[in-house]
Image (spheres, rainbow, N blue to C red):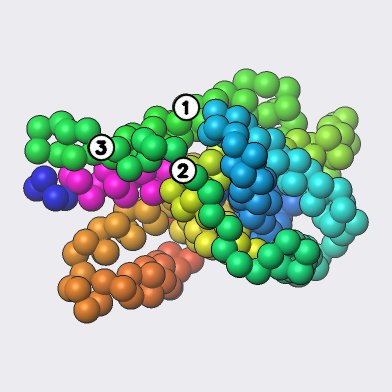
């Protein structure tokens, strides 16, 4: 029982990061019907910024806001340079554009920075633990879960209680009608990319704290995790994106701890098989929405 509780806490910590990534993916999908495979590049850019700052002796009190600002800036820049030019195009064109951005950003760092792994110092408390009875709980997981809950509550307030949230919900439900009612499409789309960048930045802080390194392809894993979590929860549902993130995190941790030693290294493969089965029996994901998105 203690081991199960330990795994649940670990899974919630990992799933919290996935939930933030998936939420960013879901926000963009709701406004543009774009499954953004370039989402992970926000963490790639932020990772190199963290590496440069760490080399200059910056503490994580300064690196943390730097990562978030870089993620927001990179998201807005990608929208301005790439996605603004294909607005109104087919879903396939948007998808190809997102893949193109992913490969271009990776190639830029590969050619003009370095192909090698760049490491940087991590906060000392990342590996600290504390005991609650027989449970040994990581300080890192505790902070991740708390920050994620606060972020989700703040995002809910933003989307439900502000004019920006109202415009975003209207655009997600019916973009053409929203424009006729006076909603400015440019502002809504840029706002959605800024919000997506903010969520990716917060997730990126914890992702980079845990890894302590970055590479030109560092964005692949967080991109796949965010997209998979959004698909599991039901593409187009923000609640589903959050649920999908927690489900994916718990599945990874529980399988890794429960599978025999010879199979444990294949955890990712087993997770993909389970996800495939989910899509066979419930292709719409765990939560079904009437429209592409209900913010």
Nearer to us in this view, 235 or 22: 22
Q: Which residue is mark 3?
A: 129
In the figure, residue 214 lies in which quadrant? bottom right
Q: Is residue 221 magenta?
A: no
Q: Residues within 10 Å of mark 2 (few under 14, many from 20)?
A: some
Residue 213 at x, y = what percent?
53, 55
Q: Which residue is located at x 78 percent, y 43 percent?
A: 76
Tags 3 and 2 in contact by the CB under 8 Å rule?
no
Q: Which residue is mark 2?
A: 122
In the rendered image of this protein, does residue 262 appear above or below residue 211?
A: below
Residue furthest to the bottom: 262
Residue 137 at x, y = what percent?
24, 38
Q: Residues within 10 Å of mark 3 (few under 14, many from 20)?
A: some
Q: Regarding mark 2 in the picture, which secondary structure is present there?
A: loop
Query: Marks 1/3: CA distance?
Result: 22 Å
| In this picture, residue 198 sits left or right of residue 264 | right
Nearer to us in this view, 247 or 143: 143
Q: Which residue is located at x 62 percent, y 25 percent?
A: 158
In the figure, residue 160 lies in which quadrant? top right
* Tag nearer the camera, 1 or 2: 2
Q: Which residue is located at x 79 percent, y 40 percent?
A: 190
Q: Which residues are magenta?
A: 5-19
Residue 179 at x, y = what percent?
86, 38
Residue 150: numbered disc? 1
Q: Is residue 8 magenta?
A: yes
* Tag nearer the camera, 1 or 3: 3
């Amino acid at each position: 029982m203690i081991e199960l509780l330990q795994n649940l806490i670990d899974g919630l910590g990992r799933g919290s990061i996935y939930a933030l990534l998936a939420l960013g993916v879901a926000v963009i999908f709701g406004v543009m019907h774009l499954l953004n495979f370039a989402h992970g590049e926000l963490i790639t850019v932020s990772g190199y910024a963290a590496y440069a700052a760490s080399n200059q002796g910056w503490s994580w009190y300064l690196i943390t806001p730097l990562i978030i600002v870089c993620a927001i800036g990179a998201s807005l820049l990608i929208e301005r340079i790439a996605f603004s030019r294909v607005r109104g195009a087919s879903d396939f064109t948007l998808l190809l554009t997102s893949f193109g951005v992913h490969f271009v950003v990776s190639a830029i760092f590969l050619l003009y920075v370095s192909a090698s792994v760049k490491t940087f110092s991590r906060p000392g408390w990342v590996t600290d633990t504390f005991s609650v009875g027989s449970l040994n709980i990581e300080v890192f997981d505790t902070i991740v879960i708390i920050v994620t809950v606060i972020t989700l509550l703040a995002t809910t307030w933003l989307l439900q209680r502000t004019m920006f949230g109202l415009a975003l919900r209207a655009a997600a439900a019916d973009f053409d009608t929203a424009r006729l009612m006076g909603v400015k499409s440019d502002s809504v789309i840029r706002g959605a990319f800024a919000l997506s960048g903010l969520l990716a930045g917060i997730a990126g802080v914890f992702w980079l704290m845990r890894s302590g390194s970055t590479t030109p392809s560092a964005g692949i894993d967080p991109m796949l995790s965010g997209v998979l979590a959004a698909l599991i929860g039901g593409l187009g549902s923000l609640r589903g994106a959050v649920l999908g993130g927690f489900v994916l995190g718990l599945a990874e941790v529980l399988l890794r701890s429960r599978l025999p030693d010879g199979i444990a290294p294949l955890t990712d493969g087993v997770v993909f098989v389970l996800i495939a089965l989910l899509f066979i029996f419930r292709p719409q994901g765990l939560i079904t929405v009437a429209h592409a998105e209900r913010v």
